[in-house]
Amino acid sequence: MTVDASAPDAWLWGWDPTPGIVSIHAEATGRVIVWRRIAATGTLVREDERFRPWLLLDRLDDLQHLGQSLGPEADASASVRWRELDGPGALRFRVSADDGRALTSAVLRGASERLGKRVGHIGELPEDAVLCLPADEQYLVATGRTYFRDLPFDAVHRLQFDLETTGLDARRDRIFMISVRYHDGATEVLEVGDESDAGEATLIRELMARVRAADPDVIENHNLHGFDIPFLEQRARRLQLPLSLGRVAGAGLRQRAARRGVPASNPDDRRRVRFVAPGRELIDTMDAVRRHDMSVRDLPGHGLKAVARHLGIAAPDREYIRGDLIYTTWRTDPERVRRYATDDVEEVAALSRMLGGPSYALAQVAPRRYERVADTGAATGIIDPMLLRAYMAAGAALPAHEPGDGTPHSGAALHLFATGVAHRVVKADVASLYPSLMRAYRIGPARDRLGALLALVDGLVARRLDAKARARAAAPGSPERHAHEAMSAALKTVVNSAYGYLAAGGELTRFADVHAANEVTRRGRDLLALLCRELAARGVTLLEADTDGVYFAVPASWTEVDERRVVTEVAALLPPLVHLELDGRFAAMLSHEPKNYALLGYDGTLLLRGVAFRSSRSEPFGDRFLRHALTRLLVGDVVGVRDAYLDTILALRRRTVATYDVASRVRLTKSPAEYAEAREKRRELPYEALLANGRETWSAGDRIRVYRRQNGEGGLVEATEEEAPVPDRRDYDVEYYIRLLRETYAERLARAFTPEDFCVVFADPDQLSLFTPSVEAIRPILTQLTSGTSVEPMAWAGTS
């Protein structure tokens, strides 16, 4: 297993060049099956292998009872073999066996004898005493293999399927239709012959038969792990039908812990889980949407239809049907539902290709299964496994997780210099500021004796720059350009998470180091102060500065050449490996609060940043008002802002606003039992809305849409983002939502006006007087909060 420890490329990319791995299935027995797709022919190859399951221990004491069956790594006669790793790390013994089950049993027996109590599971031992990875990851770390080497994204065989059901409760509702899209683009709709247990069971068998025949490497859908797979599994279980979607005969579906999943089948297990189909990768495009939105923050929601429309992949004649009307529509107009279901899988395929590239690229880097890479965070999900592989490759002992010494994290500098409306705005950005400082000043974790984290960051940055160059050189729209752009985006995500990994805390990341993190932020604050001083000295008006960049306004006489000249001059003052670039030019900006602002591009595009302007809880009518009002404000049309406000009030009073548009999307934090216990002391509108609508079961973590009715009670909206409920009672509390418009949404424009002018622009139309000043005379303002060269008085502590 040991490779040249002086070759960081092996740490970064692995060292086994085996091409085209599309899935693996490893077992604790040491059996592993590898499926590879041959890029040139599309042929699928299955390879059955053996590997030695392994784990890391802090001592060999718990294995001494094995006697002669325990021996050093070179002793081929020993069934359990150990190797002492180099260095001071606590996890210093790598122990392997032909059968991982026997190895685990031996450790548990020894630990039970040593501790004087029964230890029934490896997870019951302290984290600083043992590390045991899933069998798949043991195999990938030990072999240096990764997924998809030399295999283009489009060469992987993908199948999309989508369920249509009579309702959302698998205990009583059924599947009546399944749409399927195959790798070659062909689609098919499967339907029940009759609405009975037998008819549904036959439909599920038909889906399994299609999957076996198509033999895809990947199965995809939007919200696959949140709805389709769990619903399908529950229905198959209730019908006593063995459900197999994988490639391993008799394996069925298995469960794994996941950050975003469904409650485990066992009511005593409080984990959230996802299902696994051994031999295939189950990819939920919702994960790619969330990852994309974390970066660009411009999506109207995360639902399939809303995202597809926003990204331009929805067909012009796309069929839409409200969710709770799909089944009744099928009974009267089945062809319409067939079109709707087919459009769903077509959009999933397009969404996968558009946003799935970064996860695909990361699977070529990290020693994890593709489906786990797709739903994991970059720090603990990508960097941690890569560092583990580096230490195993170098034969180095691994440090245990270690709590901090109480030193607080100092946080980053965040400066707000002005609020209100500014024109001719420029953003200057230090690309990947904190990782750049880590590289420039060689700041890494003190316990990383190999310097592996810095080596990984160096290699990732170099590979990203290469990918960017290759993307620019490739033809627009070509598969090569798509692949290189995806790799660049994926590596940027991991590079930017390196500082977060450092600062996360020892309970979360193995090499956390608050002192190193504080040194990075200290240098970041110094560098940000330098940028602000030098930019201000060149005649710009500073607006906001933080680790994401510096926003400033330039004089009316400046051209784009002047803007670039100033950024270039200041960039020349920075340390090597720290690069300042002009990252954006905007016609106008509303600076509201730190990290909360609106930008209007020269092309008329409106960009919103921060929870004041973009929140998943916001009512759609308020979001719509804000976007309209902000666009008018940033072009100086104050009358247009007033009109947007009055039009919204009028629409509410006339009830032309759909109920969906006044509803807020909330996350449930209490189970039914927990709410029942707390209900006598305090009643909460979301739960009361559920109960009033006959919903007595839900799970903590579920999200629903609720609104306030005229009688003050909560109402529940069952519709999705695509369409408003029909029939729509529109029984919402009009005056409540008018107050919400004024006190919440209009208030976000307050920094653009003097207090007196704000009151005029947003005056109650029913309470105007003869002496009300004219709106036509009002102009937006910009208020300076501090001088252009002094940044310290307006600093907020925060995180990057």
Image: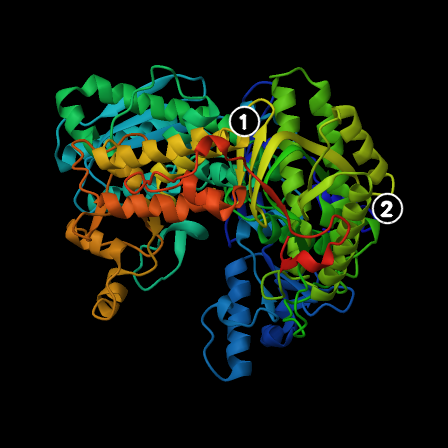
Q: Is residue 160 left or right of residue 486?
A: left
Amino acid type, label 1: Thr
User: Is residue 547 shown above or below 178?
Assistant: below
Label 1: element kind: loop
- Residue sitting nearer the eye, 487 or 640: 640
Q: Is residue 430 visible?
A: no
Q: Which residue is mark 2?
A: 575
- How is the structure coloured here? rainbow
Residue 573 locus on image (x, y percent): 87, 43
List the single residue furthest toward the bottom.
Answer: 116
Q: Is residue 406 visible?
A: yes
Q: Is residue 354 left or right of residue 417?
A: left
Residue 228 locus on image (x, y percent): 33, 38
- Residue sitting nearer the eye, 796 or 700: 796
Contact (CB < 8 A) between labels 2 and 1? no
Q: Residue at x 20, y 47 (%)?
A: 709
Q: Is residue 630 left or right of residue 473?
A: left
